[in-house]
Every structure is written in structure tokens, then in C-alpha cells.
Image: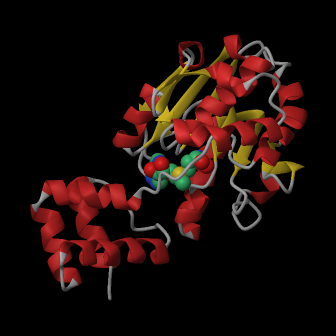
Amino acid sequence: MEITPLLEAFFQKYSYDFRHYSEAHIRRRIINRMNVSGLESIDQMQSRLLTDEVFASEFLQDLSITVTEMFRDPGFYRSFREKVIPILKTYPFLKIWHAGCATGEEAYSVAILLQEEGLYDRTTIYATDFNQHGLSQAEEGIFPSKMMKDYTANYQLSGGKESFSDYYTSNYDSVIMNKSLKRNIVWANHNLVTDSVFAEVHVIFCRNVLIYFDNILQNKVQRLFHDSLINGGILCLGSKEGIRFTELFDRYTELDKKQRIFKKRY
Ligand SMILES: C[S@@+](CC[C@H](N)C(=O)[O-])C[C@H]1O[C@@H](n2cnc3c(N)ncnc32)[C@H](O)[C@@H]1O
């Protein structure tokens, strides 16, 4: 099944560019959507995409995997507290970019951590994604109560210093994050493939996003991150992501190899 013409046509019509996403990921999502919608060929799928905007926006949701957690990979947050926070304390103000923030759990986790370390007042967090639906949920800061047991465990394992339940208010089957955590977060629609740099940021979190990209796109996005970071800035990737096989591998030192935390060389 040849998927390139479909991705090309989708880009021409809607300006969303998936031509350099991992082929296996795109193929799985296309086959799934064809099955769900009873489409029998890739040509049928393509013409439906080009003529039915509701279907196209469903497909866009299919391609954006927003699975996330608060304090996902607690060992990463523990290392961030130990190795990165002392560096951040040397700056009078901080700009932090969460690229691919999904429904916001990662940005809220970092807001909590910075608050506990006395850095939140001097920080602006830019939390971006190309999925507007996810961003709207993130901005509301409402999460299912049933997740709080796991998130509390993650928070404690990550070196959390307070009681996790102090950071939200419960309301039946959901919780709402405290306003004080939201006040320095700017939520914005940004597409890593087609939009430009965020200048002079101190830290970039782009965790569990690059796994969906092919090598060409990973290199392109890594150049974007390198251009966005200040010298000495910090890049945090997901547990299955790295820079070793990109063009930028010698532009960073490893602050924590296992937890994928890198520091841009001066
Ligand atoms: C699996 S989530 C990762 C969420 C969070 N960073 C974490 O590690 O838990 C991947 C996110 O990347 C976003 N994403 C994928 N391609 C993107 C692009 N081109 N520009 C911006 N965000 C993108 C998806 O919409 C999705 O919300």
C-alpha cells in the first residue's frame, strides 16, 4: 500500500505535513481509520480525506498520540531535580518550552517541581502542541480522579516534597489543578514540522514525540531545538529518544545519559 500520495495530498490541502513521520506509525493509523470507516482502498481513503473536513480532522487526531502522565518516568524528574535545578537557580528568569505537551500533564508536573524548588515565580512555561483539542484540555487542567493514585506514586518516586493532593481540588470523578500552577503557563498551538523557533529558551522538554518521526525529521527538529536553546541550555528527551544518531550529537554534553538529559555546549 503506497501512502506517500495520500500524505502529499493531505499536506497540499490542509498544510499538515506528515511526510516524514515514521512510516510504520502512519501506516498503522491509516489502516485503523480505514477499518473503522469501512473504506476498502487507500484511494477511497484519500478522496474522503480531501472532500470531508470532519473526517480529515478525525484523521488528524488519529495521528496525534496524546498518551501522557504526570511525573512520567519518575527517575527522570528525580534526575532533573538533582542535576538541572542547581543550574537553573543561577538564572534570574527562565523560559521553558514543552514541545508536544499533549494534554498538559508534563507541564503541570514541571510547574509543581519548580514551585517546590522556589523557581516558579521567575519562570514562563510555553507548552505547545499541534493538537488543539489536547491543548484546550491542558488549559482547563481537569484530569480524571482515577489517575491520581498513580500520579501520586509517580510524584513521590520523583522526589516530590509535599502532599500531591495539595496541588488540585477534587470534584466527584475529576480534579482541577490549582490556579497558582497555571499562572505562568502559556498554551500555544505550534507545529514542530512547519513552525519556527522559540528564541532563547533555557530548557526544552520534548519527550516521546521524536519517536514518531523519521531520521530526516528528527534532524530537522533537533536543529530547531538547538537554535532555540541558549548556550548551556538543557534538552530533555524521552526514554527511547536520543541525539547520538542525529547531526547535533557533538553539540551537547550528557548530563544524564540514562534519563536523556543533555546540555548545549558553549
Ligand atoms: C505521546 S505525546 C507526548 C506527551 C508528553 N511530552 C509526554 O512525554 O508525556 C506526543 C505529542 O506530540 C504531539 N506532536 C506530534 N507531532 C507534532 C508536531 N509536528 N508538532 C507539535 N506536536 C506534535 C502530539 O500531538 C502529542 O500530543
Q: Residue at x 52, y 53 (%)?
A: 67
Q: Position of residue 39 (x, y in %)?
A: 18, 79
Name the residue at the front extreme: 172
6, above or below 147, in the image: below
Quadrant, the N terminus: bottom left
Quadrant, the C terminus: top right
Name the residue at the left extreme: 51
| Quadrant position of residue 195 | top left
Seen from the viewer's position, the closer of residues 235 and 150 is 150
Q: Position of residue 230 (x, y in %)?
A: 72, 32
Q: Position of residue 69 (x, y in %)?
A: 60, 45
219, above or below 36, in the image: above
Q: Residue at x 75, y 23 (%)?
A: 163
Q: Is residue 215 visible?
A: yes
Colouring: secondary structure
| Quadrant position of residue 53 | bottom left
Relative to 78, 33 lies left or right:
left
Q: Residue at x 81, y 19 (%)?
A: 117
Seen from the viewer's position, the closer of residues 133 and 224 is 133
Q: Position of residue 81 (x, y in %)?
A: 84, 33
The mark tally for this picture is: 0
Q: Residue at x 73, y 58 (%)?
A: 239
43, above or below 93, in the image: below
Q: Is residue 266 visible?
A: no
